[in-house]
């Protein structure tokens, strides 16, 4: 058996495998369409009888190579790139839920995902129940119904920096015969591979660390291939029963471990079309080539920043699971390689919302940006920005303190990042 390569090697060497005389770097297949010799050859592709390319909305070789690299990093069997992280999470849920169905989600998740689940999916007839991810198994179990089709959570909650106990969530999901879907955007597979803890499907906003340079919005869905759809055939007719739009083909039977991604591609990408452009996939691949180096530096810098913040009398609280006294430290030590979470540190300034804003406005190197998890240090005040429409009470219910500053530590020299914080503390004295 071929020895599994280390993640560092997959970042560089995974994906594109050029043959004799082919380009060393991944080619961009800048084409909407593919040419065939016979009508029948293309008809077989339309019937999913043969695999091959015919139209980029369904599949493109550049995208498939990059998806393959991410699947290898996560330890999955198949993956699909999407135009954004939002599209990835939408497709991941919609691939198993239809109108009349229900799913359960951790409440400590990205604001955009929260809105997608609570507001937009509801309009499609799909209901969600949010649970406190730190509650007991018994408590979380109460949210499940006969029509529940999935359990969802984020490895590290954006923006609160909570850490999800993936093993606990997997146990609950599997006891209920549903897959566990994990958004692994913040740790990336360099720090955590949710499949190793029992997750079935992983999603990412590749916009963040994977791209890493604030260049391209994108997403990905990865399947572990581990969930047995046929064992719960009545719950997942979309995967196990004949699909009339493909002459009665049943995905679980025709594609085995590839069923989830094949269905997501053949149905959801075909009909909704949120593809990633091959140009973006190329840039994403460049980002992936240094992901392992960047993640270590992000985490090292974030730990230095978190430790510095702890020494500041103006700081009310700090959330970073790499700190020994953090609520999630033990879990981070267990789930994350060398206990490294990610580069995002959240904290509050004494004096609440107003003083947090004043502090942020005095930062110089750290830019105020909606972005997060990027090479350049950036900062956001969720109560003023992403969660602006919520009252202080609603914010607290979502686990977001009104004074919460989301500080996304970049890969500059930590000394300069800390010097920037230092001068901002001086400025608000
Ligand atoms: C940003 C983000 C998303 C949404 O991704 P986009 O690429 O912005 O659509 C989803 N989940 C998490 C954890 C995120 O940080």
Image: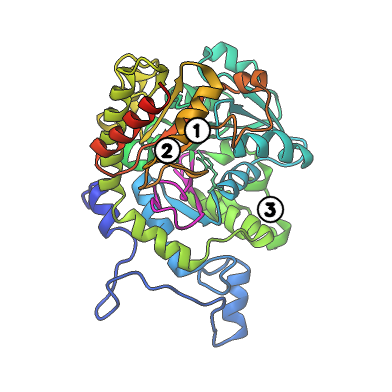
The earlier-in-sequence mark between 3 and 1 is 1
The earlier-in-sequence mark between 2 and 3 is 2
Viewer-nearest of discs 3 and 1: 1
In this view, 425 is above or below 39: above
In the image, 20: left or right of 282?
A: left
Q: Is mark 2 within 8 Å of ligand 1?
A: yes
Instruction: Kindly identify the residue that appears in the image at 43 percent across and 31 percent down.
Output: 198
The earlier-in-sequence mark between 2 and 1 is 1
Q: Are the residues tagged 2 and 1 within 8 Å (C-beta)? A: yes
Q: Which residue is mark 1?
A: 158
How would you classify the magenta stretch by its main secondary structure? loop
In the image, 3: left or right of 199?
A: left
Q: Which residue is mark 3?
A: 242
Give the class, few, some or many, for how many residues have Cα within 10 Å of label 3's Cα (few <14, many ≥20).
Answer: some
Residue 308 rendering spot, x and y as whole percentages: 29, 24
Q: Is mark 1 within 8 Å of ligand 1?
A: yes
In the image, 107: left or right of 248?
A: left
Residue 285 rendering spot, x and y as whole percentages: 37, 60
Instruction: Kindly identify the residue that appears in the image at 57 percent across and 40 percent down.
Output: 229
Q: Are the residues tagged 2 and 3 within 8 Å (C-beta)? A: no
Q: Distance between the Cα atoms at labels 2 and 1?
A: 8 Å
Viewer-nearest of discs 2 and 3: 2
Point out the stretch of residues depicted in magenta. Answer: 202-227
Quarter of the figure that contains the C terminus: top left
Residue 332 rendering spot, x and y as whole percentages: 34, 24
Q: Distance between the Cα atoms at labels 2 and 3?
A: 37 Å
Q: Which residue is mark 2?
A: 186
Query: Which is nearer the eye, 63 or 355?
Result: 355
Q: Is residue 56 magenta?
A: no
Residue 268 rendering spot, x and y as whole percentages: 64, 55
In the image, 106: left or right of 334?
A: right
């Amino acid at each position: 058996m071929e020895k599994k390569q280390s993640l560092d090697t997959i970042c560089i060497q995974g994906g594109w495998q050029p043959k004799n005389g082919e380009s060393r770097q991944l080619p961009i297949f800048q084409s909407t369409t593919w040419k065939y010799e016979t009508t029948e050859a293309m008809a077989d592709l339309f019937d999913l009888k043969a695999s091959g390319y015919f139209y980029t909305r369904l599949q493109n070789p550049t995208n498939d190579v990059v998806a393959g690299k991410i699947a290898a990093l996560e330890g999955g069997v198949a993956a699909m790139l999407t135009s954004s992280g939002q599209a990835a999470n939408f497709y991941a849920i919609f691939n198993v839920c239809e109108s009349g169905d229900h799913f359960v989600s951790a409440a400590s998740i990205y604001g955009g995902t929260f809105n997608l689940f609570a507001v937009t999916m509801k309009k499609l007839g799909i209901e969600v129940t949010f649970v406190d991810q730190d509650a007991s198994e018994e408590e979380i179990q109460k949210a499940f119904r006969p029509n529940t089709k999935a359990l969802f959570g984020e490895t590290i909650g954006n923006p609160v920096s909570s850490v999800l106990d993936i093993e606990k969530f997997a146990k609950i999901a599997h006891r209920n015969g549903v897959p566990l879907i994990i958004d692994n955007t913040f740790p990336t597979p360099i720090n955590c591979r949710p499949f190793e803890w029992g997750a079935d499907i992983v999603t990412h906003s590749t916009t963040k660390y994977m791209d890493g340079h604030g260049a391209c919005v994108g997403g990905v869905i990865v399947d572990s291939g581990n969930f047995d759809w046929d064992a719960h055939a009545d719950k997942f007719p979309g995967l196990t029963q004949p699909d009339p739009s493909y002459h009665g083909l049943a995905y679980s039977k025709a594609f085995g471990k590839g069923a989830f991604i094949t269905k997501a591609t053949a149905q959801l990408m075909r009909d909704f079309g949120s593809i990633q452009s091959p140009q973006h996939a190329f840039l994403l691949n460049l980002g992936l080539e240094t992901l392992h180096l960047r993640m270590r530096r992000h985490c090292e810098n974030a730990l230095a920043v978190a430790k510095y913040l702890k020494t500041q009398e103006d700081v009310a609280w700090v959330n970073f699971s790499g700190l020994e006294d953090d609520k999630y430290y033990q879990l981070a030590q267990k789930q994350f390689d060398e206990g490294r979470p990610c580069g995002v540190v959240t904290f509050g300034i004494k004096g609440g919302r107003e003083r947090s804003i004043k502090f942020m406005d005095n930062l110089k190197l750290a830019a105020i940006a909606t972005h997060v998890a990027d090479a350049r240090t950036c900062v956001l005040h969720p109560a003023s920005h992403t969660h602006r429409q919520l009252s202080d009470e609603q914010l607290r219910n979502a686990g977001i303190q009104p004074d919460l500053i989301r500080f996304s530590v970049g890969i500059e020299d930590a000394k300069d990042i800390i010097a920037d914080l230092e001068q901002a503390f001086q400025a608000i004295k």
